[in-house]
Amino acid sequence: MLSKSSAKLFFLVGTGLCVGTFLLLTIDTIRRVPEQTNQQNLSESAIRGKHLWETNNCMGCHTILGEGAYYAPELTKVYERRGPKFIAAMLKDPYAMYPGQRKMVRYDFSDSDIQDLTAFMKWIGEMDLNGFPPKPNIGQIATIEGVGAGTGVAQTIDRPIAFNQMCIVCHKLRGQGGDVGPALDGVGSRLDRDYIVRWLHDPQAVKPGTLMPKLPLSEEEIVELSAFLSQLKEDAK
Ligand code: HEC
Ligand code: HEC
């Protein structure tokens, strides 16, 4: 048993040590903030984007850095996940990008507002958040699966980044992705490359009224995507 005075000492020293440690850790965390947030990259545009983020109540539906509402996807890493083109298309016309699903507000953003919001997303996405938010590494899965695992079928072209950022929102490939459009396994047996090229340029022109939107793809991306898709043959599943 401790005597009364040594219990008191024990309490005071223990409390002192804990408070001291807490203060040191707090100071250390605050000291790291500029570096972990890449403060030097905080452009005028990203600051305007943050303002738009706050004044348009995006947090009424989304979380960012874990804060906000849980109706819509977490957006901390959306820049990496979807890329700038998808984000821009989404902010211009959310219904086209997620047809028939839960609703996101269609704002009347100008192109420069959209640029600012995208710059803000990019800045947020590049912060060092000690691993938050945890996520499945789609890129990695894609590369492993992209080689036609053990089927002996020559599937030589890896999934283009544009595919992982934009197409899997609506299409499944090897069981992963959305189901707004048909799964794209074996699509190379159904459609030839020229058709896919025309389709990607403008789905509405090929099939008026289709739910697939015209995506902001560059010529290079269309070449890459059509080469990738036309090699996905039925027996390669
Ligand atoms: C009324 C709720 C609501 C508000 C407000 C809202 N969103 Fe959304 N947002 C959604 C929903 C829902 C989705 C997912 C679409 C779906 O599943 O149908 C989404 C998707 C997105 C995506 C694509 C995410 C992904 O992973 O594909 C981005 C980017 C986005 N929102 C940005 C914003 C920004 C920026 C604002 C504010 C200017 C905002 N949203 C305000 C509901 C909302
Ligand atoms: C917003 C949802 C959406 C996105 C994003 C999307 N698609 Fe589609 N896609 C569809 C829908 C819906 C169809 C079915 C169209 C129809 O038959 O009217 C379709 C059809 C297709 C087809 C024809 C498939 C077949 O078997 O006939 C191809 C090929 C295709 N998409 C490729 C892509 C590629 C490549 C991307 C990414 C650059 C992409 N899609 C992004 C919704 C989407």
Image (cartoon, rainbow, N blue to C red):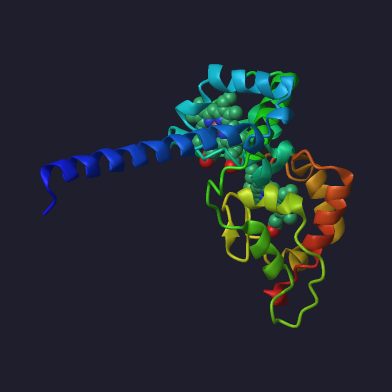
Front-most of residues 31 and 220? 31
Identify the image quadrant of the C terminus.
bottom right
**Residue drawn at the location 67% of the way across and 18% of the way down:** 48
Identify the image quadrant of the N terminus.
bottom left
Q: Quadrant of residue 10?
A: top left
Residue 21 left/right relative to 173 = left
**Residue drawn at the location 56% of the way across and 49% of the way down:** 131
Q: Quadrant of residue 139?
A: bottom right
Q: Is residue 87 above or below residue 194?
A: above
Front-most of residues 21 and 67? 21
Asked whether the viewer can see residue 100, the reply is no
Residue 55 left/right relative to 209 = left
Asked whether the viewer can see residue 134, the reply is yes
Q: Residue 56, position in %: x, y? A: 55, 19
Front-most of residues 71 and 27? 27
Q: Residue 65, position in %: x, y? A: 52, 36
Q: Residue 199, position in %: x, y? A: 79, 48
Tell me the quadrant of ligand 1: top right
The total number of labels drawn is: 0
Q: Is residue 104 above or below residue 207?
A: above
Front-most of residues 162 and 17? 17
Q: Residue 108, position in %: x, y? A: 64, 18
Residue 75 left/right relative to 186 = left
**Residue drawn at the location 69% of the way across and 24% of the way down:** 46
